[in-house]
Amino acid sequence: MENDERYFWDLTGYLLVKGVLTARELAAANSAIDYCADRIEIGEPNGGARESQALRGSGHRAIYADTLLFQLDQPHCEPFRRMLAHPAIVIRLNEMCGKGFRFDHGPHFIGGVEGTGGLTLHGAGDPHRSYVAYHHQNGRMHCGGVTVSWNLTNVKAGDGAFVCVPGSHKSRFPMPAGVRTCDDDMGVVLQPEVEAGDVLFFMDGAQTHGTLPWRGDGERRSVLFKYASRSATRTGASMTLADPERYWDEDTVEGMTEEERAVMFGPCSARRDGVCLTVDDEGVVRVAR
């Protein structure tokens, strides 16, 4: 990374790199999306807006099935496989996430047509999650989770789509409700302008981000790759392997109390059952959810 990129990333929590894809690569990626257009899922109207008035609109258009774009027939899978370890990505993620970074999940296609609704803002490292948190020490930065968004169409000022609150990865105060819903964004919510072929990096989880309803001409198209530092796991197989009887073995945990089993889970970012331990007023350890 150049010094100005490093400064901008550390200061704002996002980074835009211009013109990464060639015209031929861009055409191939858009052709691949056309090829699998029947796999695009359309969500419920206002599904991401929740209580927001500013973000209301028709349902999201997306392909969330992990690795599906890698599994398309040749040659349609190739644009996304080349994105996976593209030189422009590797040189930056080596500094953002640390050497040995890994692809965690995706790639997810995110689309929009006129009126597609937005998504309430989230992130800002609240609550703290070590696997996506941002940290700086001894002149080196480290972010556990980084999303790389490959933009396949233009997004002009006022079009909507991705927005963030620059610098929010270092905020010390809770996000106001009006900012979360964009009903009163206090002027802190930024929608970057991007061109087809640009790549946008952002601190997924550490930085406040979301989407505004799509108001642009034509279609919005982005493909998101979710990366993590070498020791972080955000989703995937770790969740299915984390149960005590699988991570260790059934003989090891046989006869353990529920409280004892609660600390025998393997590492994963999001326990599906939400189990954790607490100590009650009488000093007894209890399972909480």
Image (tube, grey):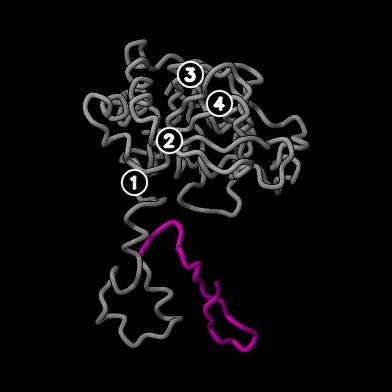
The mark nearer the N terminus, 3 or 4, is 4
Question: Distance from label 4 to label 2 (Cα)?
Answer: 13 Å
Reading the image, the residue beneath label 1 is 230
Kind of residue indicated by mark 3: Thr
The mark nearer the N terminus, 1 or 2, is 2
Image-based side of 137 in relation to 157, left or right: left
**Looking at the image, which residue is at 49% across and 30% down?**
111
The circle on residue 40 is: 2
Reading the image, the residue beneath label 4 is 113
Reading the image, the residue beneath label 3 is 153
Residue 105: x %, y % from top left: 37, 43
Residue 99: x %, y % from top left: 33, 38
Q: Residue 154 colored magenta?
A: no
Kind of residue indicated by mark 2: Ile
Question: Distance from label 1 to label 3 (Cα)?
Answer: 31 Å
Taking 21 as reference, is 161 above or below it? below
The mark nearer the N terminus, 4 or 2, is 2
**Looking at the image, which residue is at 43% across and 17% down?**
197
Q: Which residues are magenta?
A: 266-289
- Asked if labels 1 and 4 touch by Cβ distance under 8 angstroms, the answer is no
Please state, as top left, top right, bottom left or bottom right, where the N terminus lies in the image: top left
Question: Distance from label 2 to label 3 (Cα)?
Answer: 17 Å
Kind of residue indicated by mark 1: Arg
Q: What type of secondary structure mainly makes up the magenta span?
A: loop
